[in-house]
Image (tube, rainbow, N blue to C red):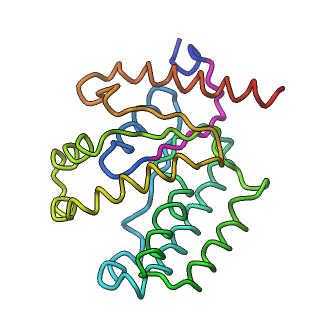
Amino acid sequence: MNLRSKYNIPANSVITIAGTVGVGKSTITKALANSLGFRTSFEKVDTNPYLDPFYADFKRWSFHLQIYFLAERFKEQKKIFEYGGGFIQDRSIYEDTGIFARMHYEKGTMTPIDYETYTNLFEAMVMTPYFPHPDLLVYLEGSLDDILSRIKERGRPMEQQTPVEYWEEMHERYEKWINSFTACPVLRININEYDLIEQEASIEPIIEKISNALNQHSLLVKR
């Protein structure tokens, strides 16, 4: 018996993984997909035409970048549900507006008019009964020290050159965002509860928690 059947997880489930840089979203996305026999959905960074201009001039290109991400994630979300579900998704469409667009606006790298236009578009596209929201958002959380340690371990040059203050701000913004998130059910998992690199079997307790969260929500909906 595979783990999806063992824990009675519907074959059409859509599970989104969220969390700040360094928590291991891609690793757990792959592990869950392999264990459940689901497809994966990853962010398409290499084909984004706005990334390089954005890093050269935040203020000029932040609105363009966020609109591009919104359009691409919206198309990806539609595709997932047109397939009939059965997906693990790396990063959610909700983080773009709740964290990144808001951060640009608050820091002055996105004008108030652009921010209002972006949020109005997001609300019209995403925050409606017609938009296919995930069945569950798995939020990976950990202490700032644990996350900084993981960022250091994986050694990506751009991340190593980023000031610690940026990671502190992102950690705080993610915590504020998830504490007020209501678009779909949330399961919070601490990154210290498992080690998928050293112990592949540590994915099973996570799957059990996902099953419990999905079943609990299903019961609430039926009432």
Front one among 175 and 141: 175
Does residue 15 show up magenta in the picture? Answer: yes
In the rendered image, residue 212, in percent from the top left (x then y), is placed at 59, 21
**Which quadrant of the view contains residue 79?**
bottom right
Front one among 20 and 156: 20
The residue depicted at 33 percent of the width and 85 percent of the height is 57
Which quadrant of the figure contains the C terminus? top right
Front one among 7 and 179: 179
The residue depicted at 51 percent of the width and 68 percent of the height is 69
The boundaries of the magenta stretch are 8-18
Front one among 186 and 210: 186
**Which quadrant of the view contains residue 27?**
top left
Q: Is residue 20 above or below residue 37?
A: below
The residue depicted at 53 percent of the width and 61 percent of the height is 98
In the rendered image, residue 22, in percent from the top left (x then y), is placed at 30, 48
Looking at the image, the residue that sits furthest to the right is 223
**Which quadrant of the view contains residue 156?**
bottom left
The residue depicted at 50 percent of the width and 73 percent of the height is 66
In the rendered image, residue 102, in percent from the top left (x then y), is placed at 50, 69
